[in-house]
Amino acid sequence: MFRHVVLFTWVEEATDAQKAAVVTELSRLTEIIPEIRAYTLGSDAGVNPGNHEFAVVADFDSVDDYLVYRDHPEHQAVIAEHIKPILASRAAVQFAF
Amino acid sequence: MFRHVVLFTWVEEATDAQKAAVVTELSRLTEIIPEIRAYTLGSDAGVNPGNHEFAVVADFDSVDDYLVYRDHPEHQAVIAEHIKPILASRAAVQFAF
């Protein structure tokens, strides 16, 4: 399996509605991109200080299937329309497991 | 379920042996801490530029079980002896899913 992990922080001005739209729009991708094997996402639980604010963990059968997701026009549209407008910082790793 | 996600970058002087020890020592925790439900870790595959270098994704039944892991002396020993000496930066999120 191949796992994509990405963590975000949002700009201070980001509204709850904008953050909720990221969840809704990303979640829709599981119905659109059949290469996604598992998809979990969520806002930080607030247990530890200094954390990022939001996480996505997506699993694929292969790196090629991950690339289908990464480059899919619907995914790119979510990034452009919902993530980038409120993005402060981003950290990511992809790894085989 | 409760998911802990953490991404690391290492200092430039970190050796392959030091990085391998992080993998070995963290992997041992699955045999020591029964609260861990799933544990995946790995070095970045090099598919995308600008990524962090190493990821850990750990799943628990509850936030309380995550806290057992977070504060477990054997985990803290791995952090102190193997991670902190080569740590450049760290990004983390915990979320319920």
Image: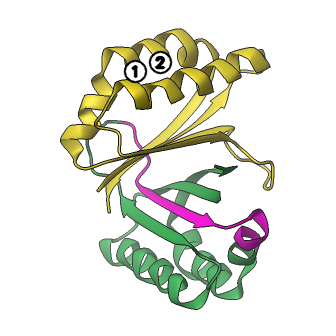
Chain colours: A green, B yellow
Kindly identify which numbered label has been placed on residue B75: 1
In this view, the residue in front, A63 or A16, is A63
The residue nearer to you, when weighing A83 against A13, is: A83
- Residue at position x 74%, y 15% from top? B17
| Residue with the most extreme left position | B64
Residue B50 appears left or right of A54: right
Q: Quadrant of residue A21?
A: bottom left
Residue A39, how many percent across, how many down?
49, 69
Q: CA distance from mark 1 to mark 2?
A: 6 Å
A64 w.r.t. B6: above or below: below
Report if the CB atoms under discs 1 and 2 are less than 8 Å apart. Answer: yes
**What's the amino acid at mark 1?**
His
Given the image, what chain letter belongs to the residue carrying mark 2?
A: B
User: At 71% from the left edge and 87% from the top edge, which residue is drawn?
Assistant: A73
Quarter where residue B54 is shown: top right
Confirm whether the magenta stretch covers residue A7.
no
Q: Position of residue B15 (x, y in %)?
A: 77, 16
**Quadrant assignment for the N terminus of chain A:** bottom right
- Identify the residue position indicated by label 2 in the image: B79
